[in-house]
Amino acid sequence: MSQTNFLIGRGELLTNDIKGPKRKPSKAEVYTFQEAARRLTPQFSETAAALDTLPSDACPGDFGVARLTMNPSYIARSFFPVAMLRTVGLESVGSRTVKVMPDGWTKKGAPQECTTTELFVAGKRQAFRNLNGWTQQVEPESDEALDLAHIERFSVFAPEQRIATYGCKKDRFFEVGIHLLPDENRLFVQRAFAKYAKGVEVKVHSDLGFTAGNLWFVPVEGKHNNIERLAEFVFVRVIRPMPKLRGMRPVPRAGGVSVGCSLPAEQPLSAEPKVAILDGGLPKHHAIGPWLRSYRVLDEDAADDPEGLEHGLAVTSAFLFGPIQPNGAADRPFAYVDHLRVLDKDADTEDPLELYRTLGFVEEVLLSRQYQFINLSLGPDLPIEDTDVHAWTSVIDDLLSDGDTLMTVAIGNNGEMDRLSGNARVQVPSDCVNALAVGAANDIEASWARAPYSAVGPGRSPGVVKPDLMAFGGDATKYFHVLSPSKKPVLAPQLGTSFASPYLLRSAVGIRAILGAELTPLAIKALLVHAADPSTHDKLEVGWGKVPEDLMSIITCPAGVARVVYQGELKPGKYLRATLPLPAGGLSGNIQLTATFCYASPTDPQDAAAYTRAGLETVFRPNDEKIKDGKANADTKGFFDMKKYATEEERRSDMGKWETVLHGSKRMRGSSLNNPVFDIHYNAREAGGRATGAEKIRYALIITVEAPKHADLYNDILRAYAKTLVPIQPQVSLPIRIR
């Protein structure tokens, strides 16, 4: 019997810190200081005058907020106007991405409309009145003057610009995002807002509010004309009608004939992984008892929603067994599961506040730090947008930023809606950068495609590749069969991203169950992305692709293949060199190299334009003997295709370096490799600018070398690195059927 070659671990021992390259000089200036002063002086005057017209109670502490739009040539964090803002008594409280037609830029040819960063800057109204006087006094060669020259526009943040939409006339419930001052007592802004809202006859439900970064999300209740007045409060970022929770997709029925199956007699493969399903609860009668570790109702005062119970059981069944063949035998679960009811009967009523109550329960579970694996198949019925980050995304991303938990999120069943309007786009919170957003494939076979109902990308930047992954979710010709409410194992045909998401989590937990705790949740995430196959499908539809049905193909290496796992931490500002392991005599013939980086990142929800605080600049150096004159390091070769990440202008400015997943594959001659390495530079930013006191971040890197001419490549590499690399051995008895 041939040996099974499992993943090679301890790749992190092949890394070392290196000295970084010298920084290139700054680019040419678009505007001289004199031109900038001439352009901006009237804009400063108009902004100050507009702020002076606001009622004093809308400007607590005499604060005002304005919009500072950067010239698109200067959107990198190094151009953040720190010196100027500090000198004039203003500070950034948030940012977003906007489109502008600049008067000038550093590129060749006439300026064209493109994306740039818009900062929200706060300060005393007197500071805004003083701007023109300051412009007259500043030294033309100073850092402050340089900052001024990088500004394209300066304008008031008008009340009407804060209202995303009023929704229907009958809408009385709205959610408000409010900027908090980074260094001040947050309660100052919150209390002032509550007082102001009362004055304009708007009720604030402060007890249901969430703080994420420097944003406070809070539901309010009021008439349209009063909401209009509420928008005058200077710290309001956005007001939008309260979205509803996604409805539970109607359960398809197949003629009313009861179809059964047989359930496994064994316990789960491993008792170690801690898994939670956050959903609508479980019915009184069900057949999953042997694998249910616990069942909790998070709001004991609320009754069950009958549809929620059916949905909750279906989602839990999808995690435990995957799709079950009618009259067939269900696969053995990989782990026990806890079901936590975060949704109750109030979710189906007209009470729009339920959205915030449900998020409160999700937050409670994540804060408990009890689970390594979590599935969430619900959320707001709201497609993502580029300009603002929603409360759900903000809260979840923040709590996943340590990389200790792998959370799968269903992207929504709105894929058949109008694409041009953005209504078919993935739904909140699938734009989380620290979670796995899962779409639905219509089949488990190689001929799979996106199920028509499955939402489409792109995600917000960073997080452009959304969905992250695909898994079978069923469609009208091939249902996803799950257990229905009954003591006996009776099946119900289903379809939806709600089932694709826990099915993918099943694969993640399966890897953990087989290989044990040596692999972090982050490494498992990287492995799933690494193994995904997009087939011929558009990235906007399927992200990185569909995860293989056979787990063994993810965690083993066939002949001529070696797959190595690196897990570790990165220090801000430092350069790490990761060596690619090759056999002692090198490689011959054509080879394929595939690499996947995943890292967990702290986030700044108030800065939609600079959402992730951590970014990786990664370069590939294939041959250490090829060095250009005067250079300290070997030549680089492009590896990660940045067309995946963003619009052309975003790529030019940022090169996708703020994305939390990088994945690429290249074919090359084996002989072209000589001590190949990846050099990784961890950039840190905070509120869009340079970070002070940034923390280490966790990363996982998977590298696969495929060399058909080297059948024993796996063992050759282990022999070459005998003191360093070791196979990650399974922690359970194999072989087993693990589909």
Image: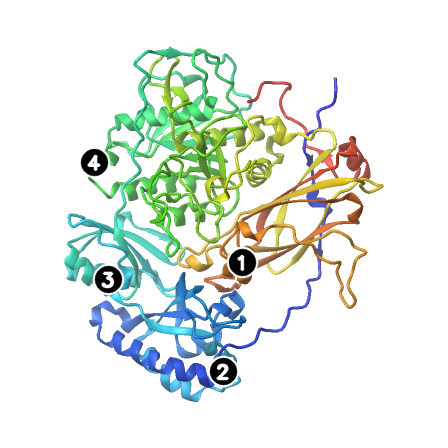
Q: Amino acid at mark 4?
A: Thr
- Label 1: how many Cα within 10 Å (few below 14, some 14–19, many 20+): some
The answer to whether the residue labelled 1 contacts the one labelled 4, judged by CB atoms less than 8 Å apart, is no
Question: Closer to the camera, 324 or 183?
Answer: 324
Q: Which residue is mark 3?
A: 231
The spot of residue 16 in percent (x, y) is 72, 52
Residue 261 image-quadrant placement:
top left
Q: Which mark is residue 349?
A: 4
Residue drawn at point x = 55 percent, y = 26 percent: 549
- Residue for badge 2: 32
Q: What colouring method underlies this structural image?
A: rainbow
Residue 419 in the image, given as x and y percentages of width and height: 37, 45
The residue closer to the viewer here, 341 or 253, is 253
The numbered mark, 3 or 4, whose residue comes first in the sequence reads: 3
Q: Is residue 18 left or right of residue 651?
A: right
Q: Position of residue 374 (x, y in %)?
A: 45, 35
The dot on residue 651 is 1
Whether residue 724 is visible to the viewer of this picture, yes or no, is: no
Foreground label between 3 and 2: 2
Is label 3 or label 1 in front? 1
* Separation (CA) of disc 1 from disc 4: 45 Å
1 vs 4, front mark: 1
Check disc 1 and report its element: helix, strand or loop: helix
- Disc 3 to disc 4, C-alpha distance: 28 Å
Question: As displayed, is residue 463 above or below residue 195?
Answer: above
Q: Give the Cα separation between the discs numbered 2 and 4.
A: 59 Å
